[in-house]
Amino acid sequence: MDLEEFKSKVFPAKQKLFRLAVSMLRDREEAEDTLQDVFVKLWSKRQELNSYTSIEAFAMTVTKHLCLNKLKAGKLRRQVDITGMELGSSEANPYQRFEHTDSLNKVQGLMESLPEQQKFILHLREIEGCSFEEIEQITNLTINNIRVILTRARKSVQDGYLKLENYEVG
């Protein structure tokens, strides 16, 4: 695989890989560094890439593993960045915007507290919009397992959110 073919097959997934890295690492600079590492690793395996059914799925797997390695090393600080999240209608009053932001923070916190596998699959499906087949390729899990994990993750976030809301009201 030459440079042009590599660019045409790998670079279209760049934004998706970056969002995954930011989602896992919670640090834009670390995510950028990780993405560079991903591209170096993919470039070093460029002769083997055509043997994969989906180069994007392989790239997502490489990204996931590099992020997990960084997280296991424990060198990252955890922080929540909601600056890029849209607050909704510009007609919302300050109270509504605060409520919306507060809800986003709660859901994001609940998602962060999920087990790593649930968090990863929920991110792939809900944030990245991956199909079950793509998630299957990335995770090497069966579609039925993915559906179960996704259902449990959604239920956990929903139950946690309702519990937080009831606690504050009551």
Image (cartoon, helix red, strand yellow):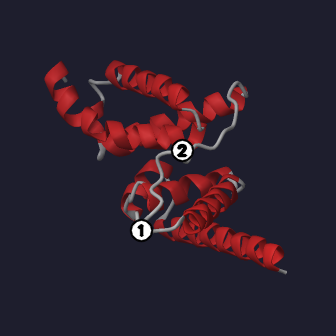
Q: Secondary structure at mark 1?
A: loop
Side of 63 relative to 71 (left or right): left
Residue 2 is at least partly visible in this image: no
Residue 53 circle label: none
Kindly state the secondary structure of the residue where label 2 is placed: helix
- Residue 23 got which mark? 2
Q: Residue at x 74, y 74 (%)?
A: 165
Amino acid type of disc 2?
Ser
Mark 1, other Cα within 10 Å: few <14 / some 14–19 / many ≥20: few
Q: Nearer the viewer, residue 148 or 111?
A: 111
**Position of residue 40 measured from the top left corner of the image (x, y, whole percent):** 39, 19
When asked about the image quadrant of residue 134, the answer is: bottom left
- Of residues 169 and 74, the one nearer the viewer is 169
Rendering coords of residue 108 (x, y %): 62, 56
Query: Mark 1, mark 2: which one is toward the viewer?
Result: 1
Could you tell me which residue is drawn at 56 percent across and 52 percent down? 120
The residue beneath circle 1 is 91
Identified by mark 1, the residue type is Glu
Q: Quadrant of residue 96?
A: bottom right
Examine the rendered structure and indicate whether residue 144 appears above or below residue 35.
below
Seen in the picture, residue 63 relative to 145 is either above or below; the reply is above
